[in-house]
Image (spheres, rainbow, N blue to C red):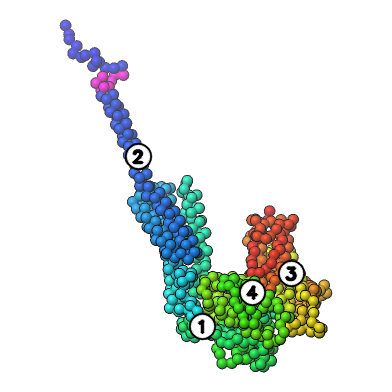
Amino acid sequence: MTTDESSPTDAPDEDGGHPGMVRVRVRVRRHRRARRRLLALGALLIVVLAGVALAYLARPLVSAKHEAQAAQKELTAAKEALSQDRFALARSHIREARVHVARARTDSDGLGGDVWSVVPIAGTAVHDERHLVSALDQTTSVAEIGVQIYPIVSGRNARLVQGQRIDVAMLQDVADRTASIGPHLDQAILDLSLVKGSTPMVGGSIERATSTALGYLQPLKDSYDTNEPLLRALPSLVGAGGPRTYLLAMLNPAEQRYSGGGALSFTTMRFDHGVATFGSSVNVDDILARGDQQSWTPVPGNTFHRTPPLRVTSATFSPWWSVSSEELLRGYSEAFPGTHFDGVVGIDLQGLSRLFKITGPVTLPTFGEINADNLVRTLAGSYGNFDSIEQRHQLNKELVPAFRQQFFEGGKMQEKVKTLVASAKGRHFFLYFRNDRYERRFARVGLSGDLSTTPYDYVGVFSQNIKGSKADYWQRREVSSTVHLQPDGSADVRLHIKVTNTAPPYTLPVPDPHIGYTTHFLTTRIGVFMPRRPTYRSMDVDGRPFAAKVHLPKVAHVRNRRYVEGQLGLDYGQSGTMDVRYRVQQAAEVVDASSMIYTLTADPQDLVTPELLHVNVIWPDGYRPTDSLPTGWKATANGATYSGSVADQTTWQIPLLKS
């Protein structure tokens, strides 16, 4: 009998495969599945561990954000403390801010930040955070420098100005410290410009933080760029390198020139290594005692000084103070030879009254207590009440010591300087320097007293008293501009001017002489200064055609404007009108075929009662403003209107889009 040595399990399967091999394959598959499960579990564990690690590493980035927010709060608190002259507290807040910034910098620049910075998408947010922290670091440096400077120039214990002495060494130190702020501001602005704010989920908050920082830093940077050169010039201007002499002119708004109030009181102001000394007061009669008229070489191109000789008090007819100041210095030096002047400082009664709001009243020997509320009325509006010419001249003599006392004494120098800068916007205060470099620097911040250089639509109406009276105290002026804007940016303009003499009735027993101190009769020449490159059309005076001549100054260093003139003679209670028509070549900037920006600038004259301006602009067909109108403007069916007083130089811009 034959024996079969194969077991049943070793029999071939239906597919012909050997049963042992089947078992091997099964075991292999099971092993592979187990290995895949282990690998999956391992990968999952790695992902979990990586996630935990990343989350852990992200903690410093979150901490950096909180530290940065804490630093911002400390800087805000420091600013508030400075405004209250609490310098020790301000320094404490800034020190705390520096601690928070250092922590934020360590957190954002550490290992966590390095790891997250290479993670796709999220890495952009890390770079953004680092730029924001860097900008905050630079801002804190600015605050650290500022808290060193601020007590020197402001506050109750400021030592920069003591009496009529300016500490030149301290002023130079302030200028040097201020100059060191610039690189920090530049770096902060650069850091903010590198922020992308594009990361999902957090990009919006990063953009908001960047916008907030820029909203704070950019105006600070602009102000620094403008004012730092002025501060750098101050040591020289107050005699650090040798004596500097200026003519101080007190301006009376009751007798107007195109430039502003008549320059009727003067003195010399000399600085030698920061020590200020003043000469004696000079008034009109003192000048006339040197001759009724003086001859000097006029500023080339100044159409307001046609032929010598001329009175010194008539030297300031040009509305550009940089021109009138130079004419004034040339004429004054002819009357009082022997003094070299480096410039002019001019202030009118309104500007002086603003100083009085800071310093309080002063007692003048002849007129008693003068304060901010009664100064203009007492010193400009009461000429008819004075019994003698001597008394009126005594008034002018006492103005100069009043300015000297109010500006140099009593501290609060920072507030006083800010007040003078604000007064310059209304042309109540100006500075002129014969040094062209210094003149340009101060002109850039609006302290030169010159007209606006805008190339767009412009309103500049000025009056000139031609009878030596003080009747401009009662002048009231309304200017109405009707503008038909064209699609090419040009405009047809009709300017209507109404001047009213609001003087009370003349009550002296003799007839009103129409000239001099006591008259209530206003004889005035009105100058209309037009936008640049205008096409003059016509003028009416009191409703009748008037053949006006178009004048164009050609002074080298100013933006000259064409102007036309008319004359009005008004008794008390009377009004007169002028209408001027012209075409403006570029009233608006045309951006493209469907958009433009209408721009209007108005220059003030330092009238006792500011000029009232009405504007009615008619848009081109199909055009409408793209944004809300500027403050004071109202929409009409086909344009917009504005009504308000012009106390300061003002510019409005209205973007338009063709629908």
What is the secondary structure assignment of the residue under circle 2?
helix
Q: Residue tagged by mark 4?
A: 350
User: Of circles 4 and 3, which is in front?
Assistant: 4
Q: Amino acid at mark 4?
A: Gln
What is the secondary structure assignment of the residue under circle 3?
strand
Tell me which residue sits at (62%, 72%) in the image.
Answer: 372
- Disc 2 residue crowd, few under 14, some 14–19, many 20+, Cα 10 Å: few
Mark carried by residue 276: 1
Answer whether labels 4 and 2 touch (C-beta < 8 Å): no
- Is-magenta flag for residue 340? no
Query: Residue 148: horizontal and vertical position, in percent?
Result: 42, 68
What is the secondary structure assignment of the residue under circle 1?
strand
Mark carried by residue 55: none
Mark carried by residue 47: 2
Q: Earlier in the sequence, mark 3 or mark 1?
A: 1
Bounds of the magenta segment: 15-23
Name of the residue lying farthest toward the left: 1
Q: Is 523 placed left or right of 177 in the picture?
A: right
In the image, residue 120 above or below residue 229: above
Q: Is 557 placed left or right of 188 in the picture?
A: right
User: Of circles 3 and 1, which is in front?
Assistant: 1
Distance in Å between CA atoms under marks 2 and 1: 77 Å
Q: Nearer the viewer, residue 503 or 636?
A: 503
Q: Residue tagged by mark 3?
A: 478
User: Of circles 4 and 2, which is in front?
Assistant: 4
- Disc 3 residue crowd, few under 14, some 14–19, many 20+, Cα 10 Å: some
What is the secondary structure assignment of the residue under circle 4?
helix
In the image, residue 287 above or below residue 412: below
